[in-house]
Image: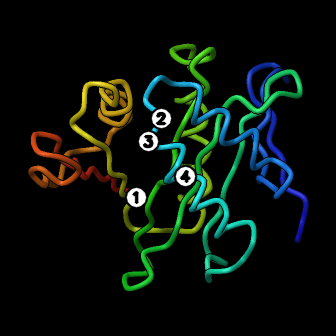
Amino acid sequence: MKKEHKQLVNGAISIRPADPKDKSRILSVIGSYRVKWDRDIAKRYYDDYFLSSVNLKDDKIYVAVLDNKIIGVTGYSIDRYEARNYWLGWFYIHKQYSQKGYGTQLLNFIIGKLSKKRIKRLFVNTSSHPFYRAALDLYLKNGFRIDAVIKDYYWNGEDQIILSKQL
């Protein structure tokens, strides 16, 4: 595996591929919010990803690092049945570092990576729950459009919102 690393913002922030020793710190980023259900679901995904119990070889996970501390995480996975489309996954910035532009930088890093792969479209899903409003706003501000809303997907009154961006 070749070493991959990218510096951003005057050398203060770096984005690098995640490795198994990062798992607990990644889960701490996701768990930094009062809403805890994502952390439990994310743990199952990262167990599969890092332990290779499921074939996730095409998935890629990156962490955002500031002062040697993981402050963000995201990644992408290929749509296994339409290989020109990818899905953004587990996009989180630690609560202490949110609303400071790090999310936009991490999103732009992923978009840049996928643009080089000449993919057709990047999809992401989020929730209509008020907790996820900042994420929805970030996606819309960065050129994503709402493609579908699945009513009551998560709970009664909580919809799944599917967005995409043409690359």
Q: Within 10 Å of the Cα at label 1, are there few (<14), some (14-19), or many (20+) other Cα atoms? A: many
| Front residue (pair 136, 112) | 136
Going from the N terminus, do you reach mark 4 or mark 2 first? 2
How far apart marks 2 and 3 lie (CA) works out to 4 Å
> Is 32 positioned to the left or the right of 69 in the image?
left
In this image, 113 relative to 25: left or right? left
Q: Residue at x 81, y 34 (%)?
A: 7
Residue 97, quarter of picture = top right
Residue type at mark 3 is: Trp
Mark 2 or 1: in front is 2
Q: Nearer the viewer, mark 3 or mark 1?
A: 3
**For residue 126, what is the image quadrant?**
top left
Q: Which mark is residue 36?
A: 2
Question: Pointer 4: residues within 10 angstroms few (<14), some, or many (20+)?
Answer: some
Q: Circle 1 is placed at which residue position? A: 122
Give the Cα separation between the discs numbered 4 and 3: 9 Å
Q: Earlier in the sequence, mark 3 or mark 1?
A: 3
Q: Nearer the viewer, residue 134 or 166?
A: 134
Q: Is residue 6 above or below residue 10?
A: below
Badge 4 element: helix
